[in-house]
Amino acid sequence: MISPSQACRWLKLKGGVPPVHEPPDPESCRDWIRERNRAGDAVLILGGGGQWFLGNDPEQATQVLSVRGWDRILDHSPGDLTVTVEAGCPLERLQETLSEAGQFLPFRPPNYRHATVGGAVATALAGRFGLAMGGMREFLIGIEVLHADGRLSHAGGRVVKNVAGYDLCKLYAGSMGTLGIITHATFKVRPLPPASRTGFLEFDNLSELLETAISLRNQVVPAALELFRPGMGFLEGGEASGLRRQAAASDRYGLAIELRDSEGPIQWKSRAVRQRCPGIRFLDTAEADSFWKGWDRELSRALEPDNGRVVVRISAPAGLLEEVHRWVEQTLPGHGLSGHAAGSTLLIFTTGTDFLRDLRSRWENQPVYSTLFKADAALKQGLEVWGPTTQPLPLMRRIKEQFDPRRTLNPGRFWGGI
């Protein structure tokens, strides 16, 4: 996990790192958060700290609440395919426990080795498995939340077929901790696929890659389709050299295809992929494991604070995305690139943010969505990190006013300064 001082380096905070409060359990936190709320404090919620690069800088921060002590797996029912776990539990440890029962959750957020359950819910970043297997909102079936006034509330339950009342779980997922402090969550889990296989393709242009990715998505439903091109701090030199040997040449686009299923379907899918793409190169098990570990490591390196790297996330329909990227190519020669090919999402790795205003202005009235995913605090100044939203901001603000009227929790971190 990342220390509070390291996590705060992503943010522009006056006065340095605020005091850190680390209660052993949610119950012992209730009086503390109630007093902070009455005193008008602004509390930042800290889990693993690995997702703090995301979002606006807070309006203010007088306290940090660490939930790392809330790390128990409260209930795992393999027969019912559910698990209930406290918010501070490392996601990696939860996955290890589930794997012993032949189960898993398809979440692989950036900075995975630092991710906690609460942080994964608060950011709703599913990672490379999200499109094929579902995102956070599809798997979250129950939640307990501690509100700024000290009240505990519950939504959903511990069984999959729970349809009573409003599905408030989906409201908290992706809310960036602005509505309440997640204490524990219940998920439905999936059986762990017994076999996997990873292959690579290379392309001269992004248009051909995206066309192939959509065709493969519809034909064989891969677990992941990740695109990439080395450059500007992604898959470059040092620790990444071994990873680059498996990846694309620096002037070409690569597509990593991950298949997960039982052995029979894996064989059928592999033949179908090879028939569609004769040039595919499949890795053996050790090479594939090394590649994906290296992939996670390289993404974490690009997201480190104070490294001068800017990461921008762009989503658009496939045809329009290729047009946007042609413009990015001309504007940012030598940039690094990764993304979810089947989901038409790119991560652009570069060193500045000036191009982002031009990009948003150029496609202002089209379905092109750009988020300043990660940047040093000074580069965020004067920019709307989240970009324009199609969501009804007045409604979102009213929800914030109902759940946290004194703006105690993560103030300003979400869309529109919520």
Image (cartoon, grey):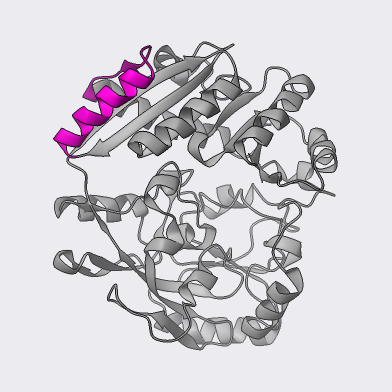
Q: Position of residue 4 (x, y in %)?
A: 54, 55
Q: Which residues are magenta?
A: 262-285
Q: Classify residue 207 as left or right of residue 94.
A: right
Q: Nearer the viewer, residue 111 or 159?
A: 159
Instruction: Please determine whether, in this image, residue 244 is positioned above or below residue 258.
Output: above
Instruction: State how many labels appear.
Output: 0
Instruction: Please determine whether, in this image, residue 217 is positioned above or below residue 137.
Output: above
Q: Position of residue 22 (x, y in %)?
A: 46, 69
Q: Position of residue 380 (x, y in %)?
A: 77, 46
Can residue 307 be seen by looking at this rendering? no
282 in the magenta segment = yes
- Quadrant assignment for the C terminus: bottom right
343 in the magenta segment = no
Q: Nearer the viewer, residue 330 or 274?
A: 274
Can residue 156 be seen by looking at this rendering? yes
Task: Give the main secondary structure, helix, strand or loop, of the magenta stretch.
Answer: helix
Q: Residue at x 42, y 83 (%)?
A: 154
Q: Residue at x 14, y 55 (%)?
A: 101
Q: Nearer the viewer, residue 236 or 408?
A: 236
Q: Residue at x 72, y 21 (%)?
A: 329
Q: Position of residue 399 (x, y in %)?
A: 66, 79
Q: Which image quadrant is residue 362 in?
A: top right
Q: Residue at x 21, y 48 (%)?
A: 192
Q: Nearer the viewer, residue 287 or 21?
A: 287
Instruction: Please determine whether, in this image, residue 87 is positioned above or below residue 197.
Output: below
Q: Classify residue 205 as left or right of residue 103.
A: right
